[in-house]
Image (cartoon, helix red, strand yellow):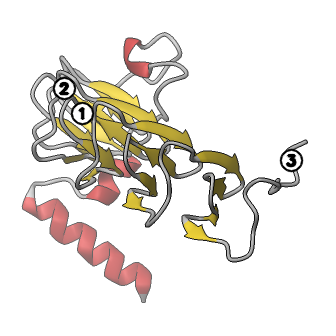
Amino acid sequence: MKRIVLSFALLVIAQSGKPSVIEYRLQEPSFAATENAPFQERGRGNGTYTKDSWTVFYRGYEVEGASPSSFEDLGSGYGKDAWKVFYQGLGIEGASPSSFRSFGDGYAKDDWQVFYRGRKIENASSSSFENLGGGYGKDSWTVFYRGKPIPNASASSFENLGRGYGKDAWKVFYNGKAVKGASPSSFRTPHQR
């Protein structure tokens, strides 16, 4: 039954004159995905953006409004051309392509704003923001976990300990939440010596 429905759907789409997503996946790509391709950004990108002479693609789907002649894969789902910034193939409103850069771990910034997974982080300072890894980031005043502020965490003393843990001078945190009863002065994760 599923095969009949799928065949019927493909027939209807074929008669409309527009290729379907299924047909796109069955066709050979029209771009060169070789080690010598200049777009490959070896070591920086994560292989999610590709392009040919006319179109930019994110995981096989066309990125609307992207210019292939100036497009760069920034890694972690971010990309930009001369006019616009994209996250997972969708435009990020208000982001400045001329100063935009990705830190990895979902974090990125331009000269005025900080982003986590393509969404602006309210009240984050772009000039002082840094990615600490493991979902943690901070600016001069606030510590963030996965783009959300951690209440009462001290940015001046905060450090990422790995495996979801972080600490400041007063508290230990796990996945952005305070760990009751843990002493930051003596707290260690198993991989720390």
Quickly name the residue at label 3. 191
State yes or no: discs 1 and 3 in contact (Cβ < 8 Å): no
Quadrant including the N terminus: bottom left
User: In front of the other: label 1 or label 2?
Assistant: 2
Residue at x 23%, y 41% (from the top left corner): 86
Q: Residue 88, can we see it?
A: no
Task: Determine the secondary structure under disc 1.
Answer: strand
Amino acid type, mark 3: His
> How far apart are the two marked residues, 2 and 3, measured between alpha carbons?
41 Å
Quickly name the residue at label 1. 56
Quadrant including the C terminus: top right
Amino acid type, mark 2: Asp
119 or 167: nearer the viewer: 167
61 or 165: nearer the viewer: 165
Position above or below: 98 against 170:
above
Q: Earlier in the sequence, mark 2 or mark 3?
A: 2
Quickly name the residue at label 2. 81
Residue at x 34%, y 76% (from the top left corner): 6
State yes or no: discs 1 and 2 in contact (Cβ < 8 Å): yes
Position above or below: 152 against 95:
below
Q: Position of residue 147 (x, y in %)?
A: 39, 56
Position above or below: 143 against 85:
below
Amino acid type, mark 1: Val
User: In front of the other: label 2 or label 3?
Assistant: 3
Q: Position of residue 94 (x, y in %)?
A: 10, 43
